[in-house]
Every structure is written in C-alpha cells, then in structure tokens.
Amino acid sequence: RAALNQQILKAVEDENRSRNLLKAATNQKVREQVRLELSFVNSDLQMLKEELEGLNISVGVYQSTEEAFTIPLIPLGLKETKDVDFSVVLKDFILEHYSEDSYLYEDEIADLMDLRQACRTPSRDEAGVELLMSYFNQLGFVESRFFPPTRQMGLLFTWYDSLTGVPVSQQNLLLEKASILFNIGALYTQIGTRCDRQTQAGLESAVDAFQRAAGVLNHLKETFTHTPSYDMSPAMLSVLVKMMLAQAQENVFEKICLPGIRNEFFMLVKVAQEAAKVGEVYRQLHAAMSQAPVKENIPYSWASLACVKSHHYGALAHYFVATLLIDHQLKPGADEDHQEKCLSQLYDHMPEGLTPLATLKNGHQRRLLGKSHLRRAIAHHEESVREASLCKKLRHIDVLQEVLSAAHQRSRLKYAQHQEDDELLNLMDAPDIISKTEQEVEIILPQFSKVTATDFFQKLGPLSVFSANKKWTPPRSIHFTVEEGDLGFTLRGNSPVQVHFLDPYCSAALAGAKEGDYIVSIRDVDCKWLTVSEVMKLLKGKGKDDVEMKVVSLLDFTSSMHNKCATYSVGMQKTYSMICLAIDDDDKTDKTKKISKKLSFLSWGTNKNRQKSASTLCLPSVGVARPQVKKKLPSPFSLLNSDSSLY
C-alpha cells in the first residue's frame, strides 16, 4: 500500500505539471504533445488506483485464513502517513512557553515519536486497537500542552487517502487525530474480516468488530466535520458506517444458519426473514453508494459486491419461503393458528384471491405460491451472477463465484423438481417478504477511557494550569525569611499550590511574591504536582528560616494570543507585547499606608478593617479583584476572526 501511494503521488504530480504546462503553452505542437503526455499520465493513474482498489478487496490479504465457503467481506485499508519530527518544535515551545530546559524532555519526545511510528503498522488484533487508542489519547495531551488554538506550530502532517491514495497535508493536529480515528475503525474492519466464520465465537467476534468499526467511523463523522481527505468526508463516512452495519447483519444471519437449517416450517420462516433483512440493508447500501458525490470515489468493486449481496440474500429469502410452502403440508393436529400468524406476518399483503389459512390448507395453492417464490429466487440469483461477472475484481474471487453458482443451481434444481405442464398458466407473482431479525445490529461507540494513557509531558505540571492556552510570567525566585514560624501568607489549591492572603509587609511580599502566584519549586524541589500539606512541609521543613521558592503569575492570555494570531495571519513579523494594567489612585494611596505596630500574620488576616494592598488587587488571578483598566482604542486586528485553526 505504501509503494502504491508513492506511485500515485508521483502520477498526481506529473498530472499537475502537465496541466500547468498545457495552460501556459501557446505553441500548437507543444500543446498536442502535452495533451498526449497527459492522457498517458491519466491512464497510469487510473491503473494505479485500480491496483489499490484490488488491494482493498483482496481476499488473500484481509480475509480469514480458514478455508470457508462464505462470501468475502469488505475491509478498510489503513491510511498511510509520512514521518513527523516533533523534537525541534516541541523543544522550542517548551523553552518559549514553559520557560523550562527543553533538553530535559528529550526522552518524552522520543517516546511520542516511537509511539507514532508503531501506530503505522499495528497488529490486526485488540492489541493493535489499544495501541492506536493510546496514541489518540496521547494526542489529546499533546494538543493541550503544545498547540494553542490561535497559532500554527509549523508541524506538517501528511496522510494518504485510503481509497484513492492521494496525499493530504496540513499544519493541523486535527488531521492527525482524525486519521488515527479512521485507522482505528479500519483496523476493526480488518479484525472482523479475519474472524473464523465457521465457529459461533468467530461470528460473534465479527459482529462485534463491525459494530465497533461503525461506531468509530460515526464518531469521526460527527466530531471532525471538515476533513480535507475524501475518505473522511461526511458523505463517505455515512456510506462506510452503513457498509459496516450491513456486514454485521450478514454475520448475524450466518450465525443463525451455522448450526444448520432444519427443514421445519417455523425455522424456515425465521431464516427467510433474516435473509430478507440482509438483502434489504445491502440494497440500501448500494443505493447510497450510487449517489453523488460518493459514486465517483467509492471503489467500483465495493458497489458491485453490495449489489451482488442484495440480490443473493433476496434470492435466499424467496428460496426458503418456497421450501416451507412446497415441502410442508398442514397436517391434522398441527398448530394452524401459529402457522397462519407466521404466514400473514411474512407478507405485507397476500396475493389477490388468497388468504393465509386457506393457502395453508390448499396444497395446490401452496405449491403455486411456492413456485412463484422460486421464480423470483432464480431471477435474483441470475442478477447476482450477472453483476459479479461485470466486475473484473469480483470475477477473480473464486469463493464468491462458487457460492453464487451453488445457490443458483439449488434453486433451479428445486424448481425443476416441481415443474408441471401447466406452468405457463401460473401467472401468480410472489409478494415481497417482510424483513425481520432477532438481533438488530447497532453502532457501538468507542470507549477511549478504557485505554489508559499517561501524559508523556506531565513533568510540565497539571494540565488544568500548565497548558498551551494559558500564559505566565517567567519563573521568579523569591528569597524570604520565615519569622517565628509565620510565612506571611496562606496556601490554597492543590497541584499546583497558590499563594493566598499575602501580608503586604511580610518578607515574601517584599521579595516580590504576589497573591495568586503559583509555587513551582521550593529549594530546587519541583512543587507543581504537590498538595498544600506537602508544600507546607517544604516551606517549614529542616528548621531553616531562609526559604528560596520559584513562582509564576498567570497572565491574561486571551487578548495577547488574539493579537499575536492576527499579526501572524497578515504576514507581519510576530510581536509579543506586554499588557499594562492601570491602577486606581485609591489603590496607590493604600500602598503608602503605614501601620503603627507590626501585627502577626494571623491577626492581620482577621482584621476586617484592613484593605488589600494594590499589589494584590492588580493581579489578574482567580479569586482576586481586577482593577479598572483605562479605556483603549480598539485594535484593527481585534476585528479579525481569531479562530484560525478551523478544521
């Protein structure tokens, strides 16, 4: 698949060059030569896409290794991708945004890249699914840590379309997440096609796999609505979801038939309606595949196989109804009411002039109605065989040809056994059979929470605070003295801990601490993940009065990031501007107030007559009052749409 994608990429590039040359050329001979070259390129591209289509429906590659007399199922191929080097971009962001030594995170970045590389070739089992889900969950952490919503990070992600092989590239992590989701769904389809359909457990696993595949693809359709790759467009995903549910319904029918179909009235009614259900969902699938714009991009062999299966299972339904009518006569002592009810529920309406009970009691009417069902079964079989013969890919699938031929011959043989001389006088048309199933397949939503993923970059701190959409001051070193066990402030919050109720005249405040600061380290011990009690032990530990701690202050990131994004989007040099907050005159006078007697911190905190200092009031942190900001002229960039990462 990777080799085919590279050849398709080269052919697409040649095609684009030829088209550009054709537009630019004015010489008639040159234009004719370019047209000839373009026709050859288009021919090569079409052949490569047909080869990719053959791989997508290959029995030897994706189907069960067990020898089985069953119709093949359709898997999805995994999307291929190019290598991505996270190291430079993430290291720069760690240094710029988190103000930390980026070389301390080399192992974590290597783990992320190794995980991505492993996701390119997952095993076709639950372990492979868990691998892809763990990377998808990890991408959620990476997005929160390193991808601000209003800034491009310069990482180019390239993924190849699973159906056409055409590459799509974007500087957007959402393309990466959507492609991984698609591959999770595709892997489930490959697991389903490789299940042993000759065992009950294998068929149950296949049903579960296809339902989960439908759930992942449906989640992708609803979550990522503007994907640039056509195999992930809403129209295509809707068809793929229908296809997975149809194949799950087909496995339900096979599971019912696996123990053997008893030639018994009620059993035949059940199997006939199950077959009609499978034929109905495949008929709906083929109709969806035949609609624009899906029709132009769906593999022709897939649409042909859906049509073949709709006729094949419709023929089986009519064959089973014919068998229950011809082979079974209503005997004395039989449950007439039950049989009458089953026959009446088998049709929307009985043929003109017939009633369920009268038909059951009249052997001649039963035989005529049964033979009309056989004629419809033979017509459906002939159509399925014809449709399979029209598709080059299906013609070369031997097991498909054998199954269709065997079912066709069985119906023809049964019809020949009951053919009579007055056959031409029988003009009765068999009615449609109402579909019914004992197990209605449905979408199983993906459960990503069941796959645990540890944040590779958790050393940066709790994600609720230390994320890409928040901005802080660089870490400030605060050297202060603990006087008589009194810190001069209290602590609040857990992981990370904040400075709270700061005495404006304590040693820490004079050293530069502010109320609302986050404590990131104490005496070179990282505190971002510590609780209040653990931080308090470090502050008062070892009997030392001198304390050195590092703190950061949260900035108003929304407006600053908005301006940076707007500046970047108009092609100007990136600028980072400081935001100055004006302080009321009343607050300034508070700072100059003096107290006649230095109170202890506890008595200061309980004094209701005291007011907070200006340094506390001007902090834009949670739980702290914001000062009045002087009215400024609106920036011309503030009118631009800041959502530059629309996907």
Image (cartoon, rainbow, N blue to C red):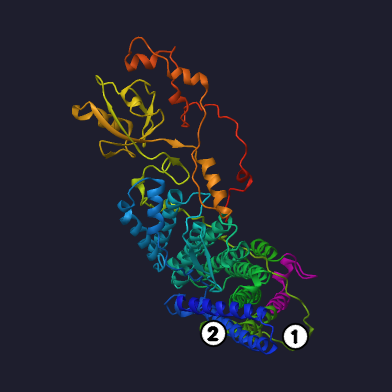
Rendering coords of residue 364 (x, y %)? 72, 77
Dot 2 surroundings within 10 Å: few (below 14), some, or many (20 or more)? some
Q: Which marked residue is nearer to the observer: mark 2 or mark 1?
A: 2
Camera-nearest residue between 565 and 223: 565
The tag earlier along the polypeptide, 2 or 1, is 2
Dot 1 surroundings within 10 Å: few (below 14), some, or many (20 or more)? few
Callout 2 amino acid: Glu
Camera-nearest residue between 78 and 552: 552
514, above or below 453, in the image: above
- Residue at 39% over, 58% down: 88
Q: CA distance from mark 2 to mark 1?
A: 30 Å
> Is 350 part of what is drawn in magenta?
yes
The disc at residue 400 is: none
Left or right relative to 534: residue 390: right
Name the residue furthest top: 596
Rendering coords of residue 342 (x, y %)? 65, 63
Quadrant position of the C terminus in the picture: bottom right
> Is 219 part of what is drawn in magenta?
no
Name the secondary structure under disc 2.
helix
Name the secondary structure under disc 1.
helix
47, above or below 267, in the image: below
Question: Does the image show residue 172?
Answer: yes
Q: Main secondary structure of the magenta part?
A: helix
Callout 1 amino acid: Glu
Residue underneath mark 2: 402
Residue underneath mark 1: 423
Camera-nearest residue between 45 and 179: 45
Rendering coords of residue 624 (x, y %)? 47, 27
Which residues, given as a range, are shown in magenta?
A: 348-373
